[in-house]
Image (cartoon, rainbow, N blue to C red):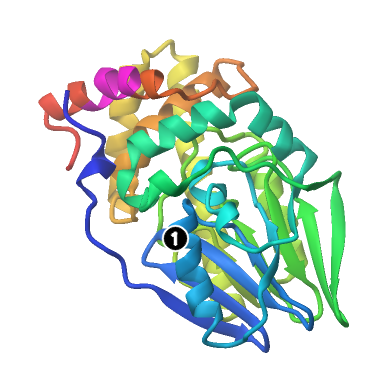
């Protein structure tokens, strides 16, 4: 069996550390998972921890160029390993996530950790330093507010989209949004644990905030309202078009393999240049197929299921010349 598309992605990415406003920063790396930084009077808040403690040290090295204050709080936008397993690398007093995200860690955190490390090894540099699953010290239901001096940071469980527990951090005065993977920019949304039916309404809630700057889950920092709108439009277009293709195929009684081939053919012209397109699409179509067939709750991805799915979809399509490398 050919390896996952991501196993061939070995090139180091150029890290950027962009200022969004006084004390507000975006840590981005050419389509790798992003982190957000909020500098408060008594310490720093990091939104999304990165995948390993070693990678968390890289974020803190950038923070040290703008402040000598230490990271005191880490907010997790969702449960995926690539976002959370670096939390132990911060001197944080609290690790915050939605109650739904904690439930997902309980239910499937270990399987997700094993699965993600196997799929995309480059994103887990220094993985031997991961002590285990990341557990929150504080959960919230719906929303909570962090007061950083006079700065208000709203932590909101915005709705189901990328996962059931998706959380954003919104600064209403500054109009800066840390969106997690509810929004991507120039990067393919990963939808293996998604709720396609709910994603458009979640995007609508994000639009209503009126953000003028945004840190998406992947992609560069967005520095004005036009760029924010472009990211929202692109994420909605990708997820809605993909689900429409799969729903139509399921309604006609099509097989998963046939629907996957059709989805790749129809989606590649508009989205094939986006980062991790070939990596994400087999997982995305598999989940869309399940949801279209009436399975509201995403099935748990395990390392074994990953291999089984990739062998069934990617290898077969590659032999027929339908998949790029």
Residue 180 in the image: x percent, y percent? 60, 56
Q: Which residues are magenta?
A: 307-314
For image coordinates 65% across by 24% down, the residue present is 107
Nearer the observer, 263 or 219: 219
Residue 73 in which image quadrant:
bottom right
Up-down: is 20 above or below 135? Answer: below
Q: Quadrant of the C terminus?
A: top left
What's the magenta bit mostly, secondary-structure-wise? helix
Q: Is residue 118 in view?
A: yes
Q: Is residue 284 in view?
A: no
Residue 15 in the image: x percent, y percent? 38, 73
Q: Is residue 14 magenta?
A: no
Position of 310 compared to 82: left or right?
left
Rate crowding at label 1 as few (under 14), some (14 to 19) or many (20 or more) other CA atoms within 10 Å. Answer: many
- Residue placed under numbered mark 1 in the picture: 55
For image coordinates 24% across by 51% down, the residue present is 9
Position of 36 compared to 7: left or right?
right
Nearer the observer, 208 or 245: 208
For image coordinates 54% across by 50% down, the residue present is 83
């Amino acid at each position: 069996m050919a390896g996952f598309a991501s196993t061939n992605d070995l090139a180091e990415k150029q890290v950027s550390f962009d200022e969004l406003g006084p004390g507000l920063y975006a840590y981005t790396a050419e389509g790798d998972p992003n982190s957000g930084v909020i500098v408060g009077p008594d310490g720093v808040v990091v939104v999304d921890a990165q995948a390993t403690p070693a990678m968390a040290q890289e974020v803190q090295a950038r923070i040290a160029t703008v402040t000598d204050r230490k990271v005191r709080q880490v907010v997790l936008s969702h449960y995926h390993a690539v976002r959370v397993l670096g939390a132990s690398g911060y001197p944080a007093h609290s690790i915050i996530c939605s109650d739904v995200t904690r439930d997902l860690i309980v239910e499937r955190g270990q399987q997700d950790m094993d699965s993600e490390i196997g799929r995309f090894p480059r994103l887990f540099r220094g993985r031997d330093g991961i002590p285990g699953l990341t557990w929150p010290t504080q959960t919230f239901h719906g929303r909570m507010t962090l007061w950083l001096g006079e700065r208000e940071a709203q932590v909101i469980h915005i709705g189901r989209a990328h996962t059931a527990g998706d959380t954003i951090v919104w600064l209403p005065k500054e109009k800066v949004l840390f969106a997690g993977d509810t929004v991507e920019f120039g990067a393919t949304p990963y939808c293996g644990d998604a709720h396609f039916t709910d994603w458009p309404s979640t995007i609508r809630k994000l639009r209503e905030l009126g953000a003028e700057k945004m840190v998406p889950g992947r992609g560069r920092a967005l520095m004005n309202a036009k760029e924010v709108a472009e990211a929202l439009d692109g994420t909605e277009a990708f997820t809605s078009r993909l689900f429409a293709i799969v729903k139509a195929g399921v309604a006609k009684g099509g097989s998963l393999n046939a629907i996957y081939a059709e989805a790749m053919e129809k989606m590649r012209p508009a989205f094939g240049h986006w980062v991790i397109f070939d990596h994400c699409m087999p997982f995305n179509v598999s989940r869309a197929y399940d949801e279209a067939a009436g399975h509201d709750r995403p099935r748990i991805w395990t390392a074994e299921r990953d291999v089984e799915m990739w062998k069934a979809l990617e290898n077969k399509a590659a032999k027929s010349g339908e998949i790029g490398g």
